[in-house]
Image (cartoon, rainbow, N blue to C red):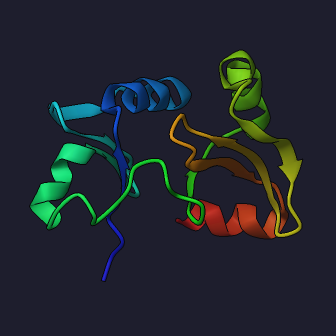
């Protein structure tokens, strides 16, 4: 079994597309007015409008802007440089400025416009650097 993607359901798909394109410096592929993806070598972040919920059984299947348990994580080359690049843009969204975590990652934690937590991280401990190079 392989984890392939994480999907965010939103009431304002264009706002989230613009946000993720800005923070990742990657253009998302918009397949329809209601569905787009950010493809990376290791997985996909999908963004769907609330209008897509009827394909999954109705509007009560998921609620936009209600996530309080999942963190969407992106490994970046240098989290401090990403923070410098994004500091003005992320000002209203930052939860935690770059901080070295006890498990060996340096992390920048922020929210997207729907309130979803996003973590940009860079492995900084020798062990994690070695492990991450093999992935």
Q: Residue at coordinates 72% horizontally, 46% vertically from top-left?
A: 109
Q: Position of residue 86 (x, y in %)?
A: 68, 22
Q: Quadrant of the N terminus?
A: bottom left
Instruction: Please provide percent x and percent y for residue 107.
Output: 76, 49
Residue at the location (59% across, 60% down)?
68
Q: Residue furthest bottom?
A: 1
| 65 relative to 57, above or below | above
Q: Is residue 85 above or below residue 3?
A: above
Q: In this view of the protein, which residue sits in the foreground, 71 or 56?
A: 56
Residue furthest to the front: 60
Q: Report the front residue among 43 and 65.
A: 65
The number of numbered badges drawn on the structure is: 0
Query: Is residue 130 positioned above or below 24 on the image?
Result: below
Q: Is residue 114 left or right of residue 132?
A: left
Q: Residue furthest top?
A: 88
Residue 88 is situated, as x and y percent measured from the top left of the image, at 72, 16
**In this orientation, which residue lies closer to the viewer: 65 or 85?**
65
Q: Nearer the viewer, residue 26 or 34?
A: 34
**Residue in the image at 18% along x and 45% along y:** 51
**In this rendering, position of residue 99 left or right of residue 34:** right
**Which percent across, then down, holds residue 39?**
33, 45
Residue at 54%, 34% in the rendered image: 113
């Amino acid at each position: 079994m392989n984890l392939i993607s994480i999907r965010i359901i939103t009431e304002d798909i264009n706002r989230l597309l613009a946000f993720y394109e800005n923070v990742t410096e990657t253009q998302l592929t918009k397949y329809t007015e209601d569905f787009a993806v950010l493809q990376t070598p290791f997985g996909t972040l999908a963004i769907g409008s609330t209008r897509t919920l009827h394909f999954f059984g109705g509007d009560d299947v998921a609620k936009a802007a209600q996530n309080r348990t999942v963190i969407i994580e992106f490994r970046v080359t240098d989290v401090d440089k990403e923070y410098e690049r994004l500091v003005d843009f992320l000002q209203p969204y930052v939860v935690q400025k770059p901080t070295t975590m006890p498990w060996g990652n340096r992390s920048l934690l922020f929210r997207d416009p729907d309130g979803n937590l996003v973590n940009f991280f860079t492995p900084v401990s020798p062990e994690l650097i070695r492990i991450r190079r093999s992935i």
